[in-house]
Structures are given as C-alpha cells and as structure tokens.
Amino acid sequence: GAVVSQHPSWVICKSGTSVKIECRSLDFQATTMFWYRQFPKQSLMLMATSNEGSKATYEQGVEKDKFLINHASLTLSTLTVTSAHPEDSSFYICSARDEVGNTIYFGEGSWLTVV
Amino acid sequence: KQEVTQIPAALSVPEGENLVLNCSFTDSAIYNLQWFRQDPGKGLTSLLLIQSSQREQTSGRLNASLDKSSGRSTLYIAASQPGDSATYLCAVIRDGNKLVFGAGTILRVKS
C-alpha cells in the first residue's frame, strides 16, 4: 500500500482562491519532504524542500509567497497555492524520505485545475 | 546545472519485443540514479535505484545500467507487455535527496 498519501487527488478552484494540498507519510517519520510540479508533457520540477519545524527551501524561480509550505509535524507537509491563477494548473506531487530505510517515496500526486 | 535528457520521447512497440530507454545527464557528480514509472494521472512508482558506485540493477524483466563517466543510463525491458505501457522517468539524485528528472519516455506496447 501507499506509504505517502496526498490529498486531494483532484481539485478545481476558482481564480483568486487558495487551495491546500496535503502530503502525509503513513508508516514513517519524514523530517524532509519535497514538492514537485509537472506541467503537461514536461518533466517534474522541484519546487521546494520542506523541512520539519523550519522554513522551506525554495528553488530558484518559485515564489515563496504564492506557494506556502508548512511542515508542522514529522508526518505532514502542506502546500498552499495562494491566489491561484489558471497558469498554476498543474500536477503537484510530493515525496518524503524515510531516513531509516534511506528510501524516497512519492505520493500519488494532486491535479489542480484553476478556472 | 544538472540537465537530464531522455531519448526517445515516445516509443511504440509490439508485445514481446525487448526495448531500451536512454537517459543522459550533464553532471557526473551524482549520488544515485533512479528510474520511475508513471501511469496517466497517477503518481510515481520507483522501478530501480542505482547507487553511484554500482553499474547496474536488475528487477524481473527490468535491467538498468549506469555509466557515470559518460553520463548515461539505460533501462532495458525484456519481453515487453501491454501492461508496461506508461511514461518512464529517469532522475538523478543530487545533494539532499533532491531529484532532477528527465522529461520521460512515453512507452506504448501494442498487443
């Protein structure tokens, strides 16, 4: 079964609203989680590294104020897309590192459509 | 900046055929290389992880090789089946377990 759960799998929101995506590690604690974005027919691009108890580290070109990341516990990281626009429509996927097993697990991904 | 390229972008083969997917990367200073499978609208499934000190990994009908010096990896799929149809992604792992992905190869195996 899945060891990293993402919710929701699909979400449609109106322009200007905010939407939150959750990433949970189910069987292990993850001090570090990663958020990726994938546009159609393009590669997955790392957006940010989420660190438990501290600020996320964003990749160059990713707006911190638009993509809010919170990693408040060892099993949950959230990505909030604020003031969403149609160009934010994408496939967002998270990964979490099981440090005990030194393995990275990916969530199922979340499809965001902004209308 | 690390760049990962996958060739071909798409591949269509008849069932039973053996095939090779190619991945190249520009910076040989990698920790590991990982091959994933992505089904439409789904997340990623890890297929094979090759440590930087290894040259290949095998799992069932899959075999992945790694040549760091030339910046190349191949994924070999033996006796392909329609269920193998998916997008195959190659990713190199750099510091902190950040992955840099290629754009993928879309594979279709026809029955």
Image (cartoon, coloured by chain):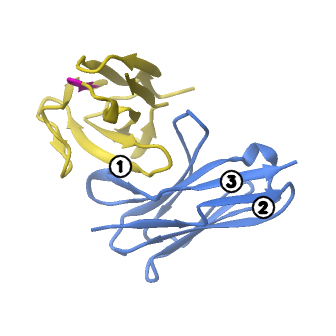
- The residue to which callout 2 is attached is B78
Query: In the image, which disc is placed on residue B107?
Result: 3
The chain containing the residue under callout 3 comes to B
Q: Amino acid at mark 2?
A: Ala
Magenta-highlighted residues: A78-83
In the figure, residue A84 lies in which quadrant? top left
Q: Which residue appears at 27% of the width and 43% of the height? A: A47
Measured as percent of width and height from the top left, residue A44 is found at 41, 48
Q: Amino acid at mark 3?
A: Leu
- Tag 2: Cα neighbours inside 10 Å, few (<14), some, or many (≥20)? some
Left or right? Give the position of A37 relative to B37: left
Q: Residue furthest bottom?
A: B69
**Chain identifier, colour yellow:** A
Labelled pair 2, 1 in contact (Cβ < 8 Å): no
Measured as percent of width and height from the top left, residue A66 is found at 18, 31
Q: Are marks 3 and 1 on the same chain?
A: no
Q: Distance from label 3 to label 1 (Cα)?
A: 21 Å
**Chain identifier, colour blue:** B
- Helix, strand or loop at label 3? It is strand
In the figure, residue A105 lies in which quadrant? top left
Labelled pair 3, 1 in contact (Cβ < 8 Å): no
Does A37 lie within the magenta span?
no
Which image quarter holds the C terminus of chain A? top left
Look at the magenta stretch and give its main secondary structure: strand
The chain containing the residue under callout 2 comes to B
Measured as percent of width and height from the top left, residue B5 is found at 47, 67
Say which of marks 2 and 1 sits in front: 1
Which image quarter holds the N terminus of chain A? top right
Q: Which residue appears at 83% of the width and 62% of the height? A: B17
Q: Which residue appears at 50% of the width and 49% of the height? A: A41
- The residue to which callout 1 is attached is A45
Does A79 lie within the magenta span?
yes
